[in-house]
Amino acid sequence: MFDLLLSPGTPFFALSAAGALIAALGLLRAEQSRHVFAGFRVLPSNAGFAARLALGQAAAIPAAGLLLLAGFTAGASGRAWTLTLVMALGMYLFLGLVLPRRPFARAEAERRALRRLTPGFVSYVRVALSGYESPAALLERYAARPHKRILPLQLLVAEALDLVRERRLRPFEAVRTVARARGCRELSDVAETLAQAEADGISPQNALAAHQTTLEAILRDEFSRLLKRRTMWLLLTVALSLVVGILANLLFVMVAGSALFNGEL
């Protein structure tokens, strides 16, 4: 082990491993810098996935190789070598695959949540506007009391209200800006309708009713497909369990029966 530390190539390998780890740290800090630049949280675009994956591989391969090299030079064998292999594999998967994909998986989950919450938000806006409530007031009331079920959309509305106070944007225009950054097409269409109606000074009730009907139909169809898919998986699991159980019983009867006839039992 000390021979490895005294090797002439050790400093260069350590510098490369440190650079790879700094690149991985840069992946973690990228979203925060984008947040500071835009003024609100901007989710990563799909165009940057290849770059993040390349940086993740550049960080994962030297780190996992360094761990394997340390275990090899230390003379690890048996369980110690198996543990070293597992740790190196886990480090490679985390730094090279899990860490680069995490923001994109989080963004996709948030887009799905916003899509499910959009019909309820449309209903709330329609009722509030029919009571002659101002856009800023209805948005503040929507985000006033955080609720776990609608928290993703409440956070989006809260960021839109921050833009209203900082950049002097109209309320629905701020919602449109933040919704576009989130990448949820359904919510962006609704926010576009609200911002256009707000700019023109007209009532968006008819357009919101059409949006709500369309979204409810789309979500209903998706739920039906999801239910059918899960039902098929459940039936497949039950069928496999029955087949395995029957085969196990047949095997037990054949083995036990042959042993009985041979006088072994």
Image (cartoon, rainbow, N blue to C red):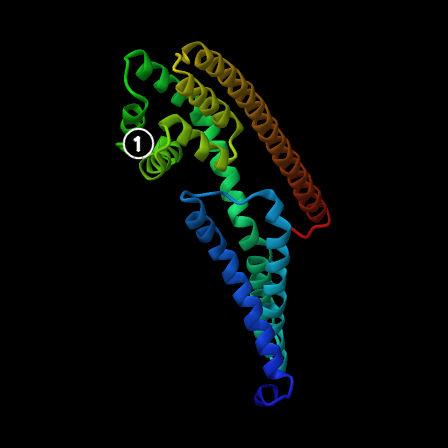
Q: What residue lies at 40% left-to-right and 44% top-to-bottom?
A: 39
Q: Nearer the viewer, residue 213 or 97?
A: 213
**Hey, which quadrant is residue 90 in on the image?**
bottom right
Mark 1 residue element? loop
Left or right of 149? Residue 249 is right
Q: What residue lies at 47% left-to-right and 57% top-to-bottom?
A: 29
Q: Nearer the viewer, residue 47 or 250?
A: 47
The residue identified by callout 1 is: 143
Q: What residue lies at 56% left-to-right and 43% top-to-bottom?
A: 45
- Confirm whether residue 75 shows in the render: no
Furthest residue toward top: 206
Q: Nearer the viewer, residue 52 or 246?
A: 52
Left or right of 65? Residue 165 is left
Q: Position of residue 4 (x, y in %)?
A: 61, 86
Q: Which residue type does callout 1 highlight?
A: Ala
* Vertical order, 235 against 133 (above or below): below
* Vertical order, 197 against 96 (above or below): above
**Hey, which quadrant is residue 9 in on the image?**
bottom right
Q: Position of residue 67 (x, y in %)?
A: 58, 73
